[in-house]
Amino acid sequence: MKLLLTTIFTILLSTGIYADTKKNQDEVDYVALATVLIKDGYYTRANDALNQVDLDDETIDKVQYYTLQGLVKGKLGMYEASNKNFYLAIEAGQTEKSIYLYIAQNSFKLKKYGEAIKALNSAKAIVLQKPNIMALKAECYFQLKEYDRALDVLADVNTIHPKYYDAYRQRFAYYISLELYQSALKDAEVYLTHAKVNEKVLLSFISALREAKEYKKATLLAEKAHLKYETNVKLIILLATLYIDQDMIHPAADLFDQASLLDRKYLKDSAEMFRRSREYVQALYKNSQLLDPKQKYKQKIAIYLEYGNYEKVLSTRSALERNGLLKDQNILYALAYSYYVTGDFDESEKLLKRISDSELFKKGIELRKNMNKCKNNHWECTL
């Protein structure tokens, strides 16, 4: 929440902070100096100036001094000290209600949500004029798990400030958290219809619905978003992921294909999705565009195995050796298995001897049993 300093400075100026006729001409007015430094954004220097103030000096206006201290401490991230000084200013006679907005902001940052609400209640008239501050109050209630009160505050925002559409976005998040998905979707529709929405906001809405496992609602929203932002890769991938969540592999593969045309980093994923959808020609085409040879050949082996082209697996052996992929136990077993299927038992046995992985070693034992059956009686051979 952005709070303006204008009101505070108006008060300080109207009380004559710059006109200190009681001081000698050569005496520095540190309170006046701090005011100027704060206005120009030099908070550390303003803090140093205020530390030079002699509080035993009866001419010092304590309201001005503590108000400035509160402002400076807040800007320096010293929120506890800031609030302490603001309350001292109130005790000294500060009557400007906007000071409570600063106190509320500090309390919120300190996660003292009850104190923030109390401060906001002390400036109720101002709060009702500012929808973003009302929204802050709602967030405080929500953090305190007083969900009904949080929702009531946002309902008041809708009534008093009907064009403050961020309230719908905020309540959407609350509804998702409370598993009130139908209400969440209604707020999403209002927000997306009236607010200035960008792709980032849409992504957050869709992701929230997906995390809540509301796949159909998320998909409906994602499809609408994709029509509007056709080239947004993140939206494309999110929609594809939603299709995968619902076992819709073919449309997901098409979307990953679109994404790969916009961003090469999705080439591998595109090839993988075409493999999963059994569109092997497309899978190999996408795979051929990969620049990393290790990635390319590991995926290519998976594609060949998927549609049973074991001769193609064997044809990659020299490339596998050249790229150090035969150190990969899974690749080694895939090659051994391909030799076994094509009837080259001797070469398969050589590769099986190099396998140390326990699970793959067990599979190798079964292969050896079958190879022995094939050697002894080809009628018992099970390839």
Image (cartoon, grey):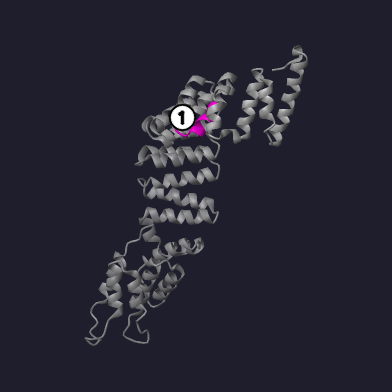
Instruction: Establish if 209 lies above or below 39.
Output: above
Q: Which residue is mark 1?
A: 256
Asked if the magenta segment contains residue 299, the reply would be yes
**Relative image position of residue 116 (x, y in whole percent):** 47, 62
Asked if the magenta segment contains residue 166, the reply would be no
Q: Residue at x 59, y 33 (%)?
A: 326
Instruction: Establish if 44 lies above or below 298.
Output: below
Query: Magenta span covers which residues?
Result: 290-300
**Relative image position of residue 273 (x, y in whole percent):** 51, 27
* Classed neighbour count for the residue bearing mark 1: other residues with Cα under 10 Å, few (<14), some (14–19), many (≥20): many
| Three-letter amino acid code of the residue under disc 1 | Phe
Q: Residue at x 42, y 39 (%)?
A: 202
Instruction: Tell me the SS state at disc 1.
Output: helix
The residue lying toward the viewer, choosing from 278 and 56, is 278
The image quadrant that residue 17 belongs to is bottom left
- Is residue 245 in view from this perspective? no
Majority secondary structure of the magenta segment?
helix
**Relative image position of residue 235 (x, y in whole percent):** 43, 35
Q: Residue at x 27, y 72 (%)?
A: 36
**Relative image position of residue 359 (x, y in whole percent):** 70, 34
